[in-house]
Amino acid sequence: MSQNGARIRIIDAAPSGASTSRAAVIHARTLDLLADIGLATRMLEEGIIVPDFTVRARNTKLAHIDFRGLRTPFPFTLMLSQARTEELLASALSDTGCGIDREVAFESFESTSSGRVAVLRRGDGTRETVDARFVIGADGGHSRVRQQLGIAFEGAEYSDSFVLADVSMVWPLAPTEVQLFLAEQGLMVVAPLPGGQHRIVATVDDAPARPTVTDIQHLLDERGPGQTTVHSLDWSSRFRVAHRLAASYRQGNAFLAGDAAHVHSPAGGQGMNLGIQDAVDLGGHLLDVLSGTRNEDTLAEYELIRRPAAVKVIGFTDRMTRMATLRTPVLRHLRDAAIRTVLHSPRRQTRLARRLAQLQD
């Protein structure tokens, strides 16, 4: 497939895109970038605009972050299912004449007389080799490309597991807020989704593989504001989270992007946004090189820009997660008091809003 004079091939081992909501948070910086390809308006029509973020200990409000004052065309968080986001991105890609070659997996690199080629495996088991000038591994936290390149993925796993669920429920708090609850048992995030649903994310010592309505109701009863009844469960999952960063984003003509380059806690809904921003930056650099408007040496700028951005996000989400999962009563009391004091300042509120929206310098 050709795009702006460059031949592009996108492969995906999966037979189809995401079918569940999963990464449902889209921040201002990402919307800024998606607006450039005409997608932001469509997403705004389908998603839920959420301009407020609150931190609570049960019924007690510890802090309120208002995104409305941010200097961006999108002073809010947008909640939209990852499945729908992927559909919109795939449709925009198709409009350019490109598509996704599905059920095709990267298997290995092979050295030839002309250099390094990629070996691909189709769903029927047949293999082919591809001699590409550039290869981008955007194949997730267990990236085969990263492994084949021998690039270390440094970090550690959190001890807690996470519950993720989309539910329909009676909810007493405002539908225009994302709420972070801090409790003795762990953290819980509740956020609105399109269709009147809510997303629940919570840390659990040992979560069930498929959390039920009863499991989610229990989490809300012990950590939430009360007066909540779960009517139905659309989807749920259990997962474990690590904070890891690739030692390098590039080896020769091969690059890493998205979860292949970095994984971290879901606190703040940063992950998909960081990956989209990687893709936009790297794609722009590669297109400039392929069109001859930049020298290939400038590709080093990708890692110089995007890896420090990941370092900041990993550090930020790790601090949020560790702060939110304190178990000692004295430390929780001190934490709550510190949140009230520190985030009472409008300047600090704005600073946190900018960081969550990924608009920080």
Image (cartoon, rainbow, N blue to C red):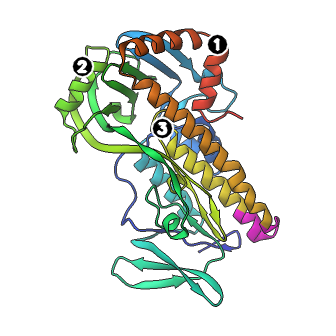
Tag 3 residue = 25
- Amino acid type, callout 3: Val
Task: Give the camera-side residue of 357 and 233.
Answer: 357
Label 3 crowding class (10 Å Cα cut-off): few <14, some 14-19, many 20+? many
Across and down, in percent, residue 359 comes to 66, 34
Check disc 2 and give the amino acid type: Asp
Image location of residue 358, percent across then percent down: 62, 36
Residue that mark 1 sits on: 346
Left or right of residue 304: residue 81: left
Where does the magenta region start and end? 286-296
Given residues 357 and 5, the one toward you in this image is 357
Q: Position of residue 315 (x, y in %)?
A: 56, 36
Instruction: State the image coordinates of residue 144 (x, y, percent, origin top left).
Output: 46, 66
Closer to the camera, 245 or 344?
245
Identify the amino acid type marked 1: Pro
- First-in-chain label (2 vs 3): 3
Quarter of the image for the N terminus: give it.
bottom right
Cβ atoms under marks 2 and 3 closer than 8 Å: no
**One can see residue 36 in this view:** no
For this view, does 3 lie left or right of residue 50? right
The residue carrying mark 2 is 221
Whether 80 is among the magenta residues is no
